[in-house]
Image (cartoon, rainbow, N blue to C red):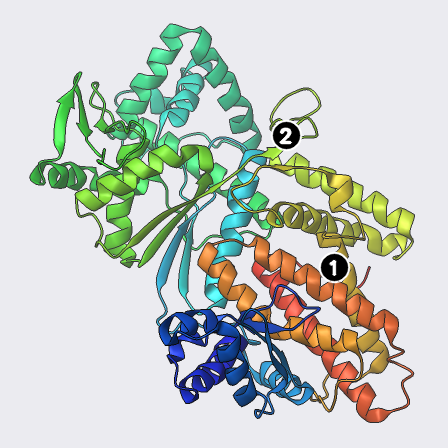
Amino acid sequence: MKLLTEQLTKIVSDAFEQCGYDRTLGSVTVSDRQDLCQFQCNGAFGAAKQAHQPPFRIADEVAAVLRENPVFSKAEMVRPGFLNLSLSDEAILSCLRAVAADEFLGIPQAEHPETILIDYGGPNVAKPLHIGHLRSAIIGESLKRLARATGNRVLGDVHLGDWGLQIGLVIAELSVRHPDWECFSPDFPASGAVPQLDADTLCEIYPFASKKSKEDKEFSALAHRMTAELQNGRPGYLALWKEILRVSVADLKQNYAKLGVDFDLWYGESDADKYLGELMDRLQEKGLLRESDGALVVDVAEESDKAPMPPVIVRKSDNSSIYATTDLATIIQREKDFAPDKIWYVVDKRQGLHFTQIFRCAKKAGLVPESTELCHIGFGTMNGADGKPYKTRDGGVMRLSDLIGTATEAAHEKMKDSGFVSDSERQELAQKIGVAAVKFGDLINNPAKDYVFDLDKFLSFEGKTGTYLLYTISRINSICKRLGEDSAAEEFSGIYTDVERELALNILMTGETFRRAMQEKAPNYICENAYQLAAVFSRFYHDNRIIDEPDEAKKATWVSLIRLTRRLLLKHLEVLSIEPVEQM
């Protein structure tokens, strides 16, 4: 179904045309002064320039035509030439019926669906997830779900860091601790087996080896050498790498599942390795390569740049590849496998220069069609109360599993104080509520902005919190259970109160919010809209005795409005990847 503003724009455009003016002037937008009107049109100002008349006269003329249309309860000119519009209750009811009957609940579907590949997550294998991975995971997941909810084909790729120095560091440390392992022998067969590892071992080894490499030059050189030999196909190192990958991916999947995050593709940098040769050939054919201090680089600076733009290093002086190389090769792989219309990278905004270089190089080399959108969706940092990146109490980087545990424990205590659920139910709900609080507390912010992590605030039953949304839905569940009419068809026979009208308009404007969120790649609009729906519903429920209402027609309408609100709130939570709860 068409968005409400699109439907109204058609009506107002017809009125402008009927009055002898350009119909393109009839664009209708949501009013930013809902106390004055619901919608507005400013086309009279453009018409005034064309017709050489005062804008108020044109707006008054168009308003007179619109007042004849039963869609509007108000169509008036406000000087110096604004058109203020409000819908009739019957029009609102008609639109509510359409939304309730629509399988997409009024969420606009892409007229020409696109294939969108979203690169998010980006963890390194052999290392535990930490809070630095939180924003990429949950912003990427919500964007994936948003793009799907608007009718597109979307693929989420974790894009593992599985082929770089961190692997060499782990292999080097294992060789020091276990020099007798056969995989370290140059004669190790390609089909040979290696000892089994576990996640705890890898989580201990990597930080130890990383610190050691900074203090021990010989060990650092060993790790670099082993990284190069792995990438050149040494059988023992490849076998050990596969074991590291097996253990790491299983651990990553388990931790991502706790966040409600999943990926369609578990590709890594290693999957792009076979395209490195093709990448270098294509750069050479285009005449883009030049030597600089023994390295091969591609110049990507443009005349319009306001700051220096360094060249992309695609091969280091020691003949090894770096992130830029594998990112470019990955673009080739994605184009061959999926031919996406868009590739979105949900990565820390501090990587902006890197992606500008990569995207320019990819377009110059013709790695993707010119029409393919390559977009870096950069996000800010999660900070503590001191305004600095969030740390553990001892100043370290907190593991993601520990953050989830902390939120779960806090939610458990919050519920104990509230007394909403029994002891037996509390533990089961605590993790859902804790994760919802963390995710909503993050996603309510513009992705590009830094924000302060405040768990007490996020767990509040009041205000813009995930906890408040879960409580609102559980409250609606309770109402519907008492009414016992959950399978009845929706009926909208009238509008009886102002707050009811406000709730109806919020429902009708949800499609506009989804479109804006998709256009700006910003899930915070979904969060804000979910909160507004919940807040207006709470006022509606507080002001009306719905269950005991004696007027059957009024009661049926109110029950239908409640059920439609629940369906929409659940759709919002689905896009945000927040799991609802039955009761709290």
**Residue type highlighted by circle 2:** Tyr
Is residue 124 in view from this perspective? no
The secondary element bearing badge 2 is classed as loop
Q: Position of residue 82 (x, y in %)?
A: 55, 71
Viewer-side residue, 408 vs 491? 491
The secondary element bearing badge 1 is classed as helix
- Left or right: where 75 falls relative to 553: left
Q: Which residue is mark 2?
A: 390
- Left or right: where 210 falls relative to 70: left
Q: Which residue is mark 1?
A: 470
**Residue type highlighted by circle 1:** Leu
| Image vertical order of residue 23 relative to residue 568, above or below | below
Residue positioned most to the front:
53
The circle on residue 539 is none
| Image vertical order of residue 53 relative to residue 450, above or below | below
Q: Residues within 10 Å of mark 2 (few under 14, many from 20)?
A: many
Viewer-side residue, 551 vs 31? 31
